[in-house]
Image: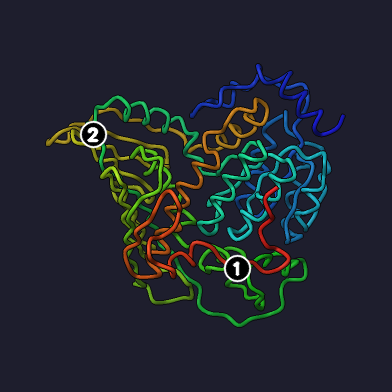
Amino acid sequence: MTRVDRRRWLTASLGSAAASTAIGSPAAAFTAPTEQLQVAVIGVGNMGYGHVRRLLQRPDVRLVVVCDADRKHLQRAAETIQTTSGVVAEQVTDFRRVLDNRAVDAVVVATPHHWHAPIALRALQAGQDVYLEKPGSHVFHEGRLLVEAARRSQRIFQHGTQMRSSLVTARAGEVLASGVLGTIKMSKAWNCQRHRPRPSVPNESPPPQVDYDLWLGPAPQRPFNANRFHGNWNWYRDYGNGDIGGDGVHDIDMARWGLGVDQHPERITAHGSRIDLKGEREFPDNMLVAYHYGEGKVLIYEDRGWTPYGPYGFDSGNAFYGSEGMMVFSRRGYFQVYLGRKREQGPAMRGDAGHPRHLFDFLDSVRSRKQTVAPAEVAHLSCGLVHLGEVAYRVGRVLHFDPQTETVRGDDQANELLTKAYRSPWNLPEAS
C-alpha cells in the first residue's frame, strides 16, 4: 500500500473512531486502531527522548526511525524502543533520510531551536504530519512560513505547548468564559528560575560521536565549544531564544490564551539586564516586556533567572485580571480564582500539566485529520510575542508593529531582526 493510499485508508476507516481532539480529551478515550502509525523522532536528547518514551505508551504507534546528530542519543533511544516494543528502529544522523522515508507518516521534532523551522518546513513539504517542539520558530519570519506551509500541505501540525491539552486548562477556560471575573483586560506571564551560568571554556574538538557540522546546520560556522552544546545552547542566539523562548513561551502562550487575543500586538516595550554577572551567555537574566493590543488589552511578561521563587508560589505562571476578580494559573497544573475587594476564593483546580495528553492529541488528529489544539496559527501568534519582545529589548526602543503586514513601522533595524541569514545549504525551502 503506498503512503498516499494508506493515508486515505486511515482517514476513511478510522476517522469516525478517533477520539475527540478538544482541549483536555483523555488519552483513554482513543479507540484502538487496526493499523499502526509509522512515526519518527528527530532530536532524541532530553525532550526528544521523553517523547520516545511517551510514544511507546501508544499501541497504535510504531517508532520506525530515530534521528540525532549525536550517536549516543541515537543508541539510547533505539535501545529503549527495542526493549519496550521489540521494534528495531532505524538510526540516522541526517534528518533528510527521515523525510525521504515514504513509510513515515508523522515526525516529532525536538532539536535545538535553530533547527525547528528548517526541519518542519521540509517535513510538511514531504507530506509528513509534524509535532514541533516549542518555540516553533527561531525568528519571527519562520512562524509565518510555518503557517503557510501547514495550510498549503494540508498536513496536521501541533506545537509543543503542552498546557493547551491539560484538563486544568479546559476547566480554567470554562471559568474565564463564564464571566465570573468580569471583563479581562490584562494578563501576566512569569518564568522564574535560579540559573547557574557556566564560566567560559576554550574551544575544542567536537566529541567523536557527534556530526558537529550537521548539528550547526543553518547556524554560522564556528569552532566547537562545550558551552554552546548540550544543555546550554539556549543561551546563544545562533541556536536558542534565552529564557523568554526556552521556557517562558509556555507561560506567554497561556497569557495570550487567557487574555483572549487572536492577533499580534501593536506596541511592544521591553527592558532587561544582567544582574548575575558570572558566567557566559548572550541573553539578559531578567526581562520585562509589555505587549499592547489594539483593543486596549495588555499582556505582560516577566522572567527572573536569578531567583529560586516565583509569585503565588509558582516558578511558572499567569495571572488574568478582570474587572470583578482575578485568576492565578500555572502550567504546573493549577488555577485559583479570587473575587472582589476581599479576594474571596472562587473556583479552583489542581491537575495535570498536559503530558502526555498533548502528544496524544496530535496522534489522534493524525488519525481523524481534525485540527489540533495548537496548530501553526496558534504557534505563530505566541512565538511571535517571544521574538517581538527580544527584538524590542535588542533595539532598546518601543516597537510600533503592524499586525497586517507583520512589520515594524519605520524601523529598519528592528525589521532586520525579524529574520536571519541561513548557512548554505540549509536555506529555508522554497514554497511548493
* Quadrant where the N terminus is found in the figure: top right
Circle 2: is it few (<14), some (14-19), or many (20+) Cα within 10 Å? some
Residue at the spot 77% in from the left edge and 66% down from the top edge: 209
Comparing 396 with 207, the one in front is: 396
Image position, residue 157 (x, y; %): 61, 39
Q: Residue furthest bottom?
A: 202
Name the residue carrying label 1: 421
Residue at the spot 47% in from the left edge and 39% down from the top edge: 163
Residue at the spot 66% in from the left edge and 45% down from the top edge: 108
Amino acid type of the residue that numbered disc 2 sits on in the rendered structure? Thr
Comparing 96 with 250, the one in front is: 96
Left or right of 45 in this view: 386: left
Image vertical order of residue 81 relative to residue 8, above or below? below
Comparing 335 with 431, the one in front is: 431
Residue at the spot 50% in from the left edge and 77% down from the top edge: 199
Which mark is first along the chain, 1 or 2?
2
Image vertical order of residue 59 relative to residue 280, above or below? above
Image position, residue 141 (x, y; %): 53, 56
Amino acid type of the residue that numbered disc 1 sits on in the rendered structure? Ala
Left or right of 47 in this view: 128: right
**Residue 212 visible here:** yes
Image position, residue 215 (x, y; %): 69, 64
Name the residue carrying label 2: 183
Q: Total number of numbered labels? A: 2
The image's mark for residue 74 is none
Circle 1: is it few (<14), some (14-19), or many (20+) Cα within 10 Å? few
Q: Residue furthest left?
A: 341
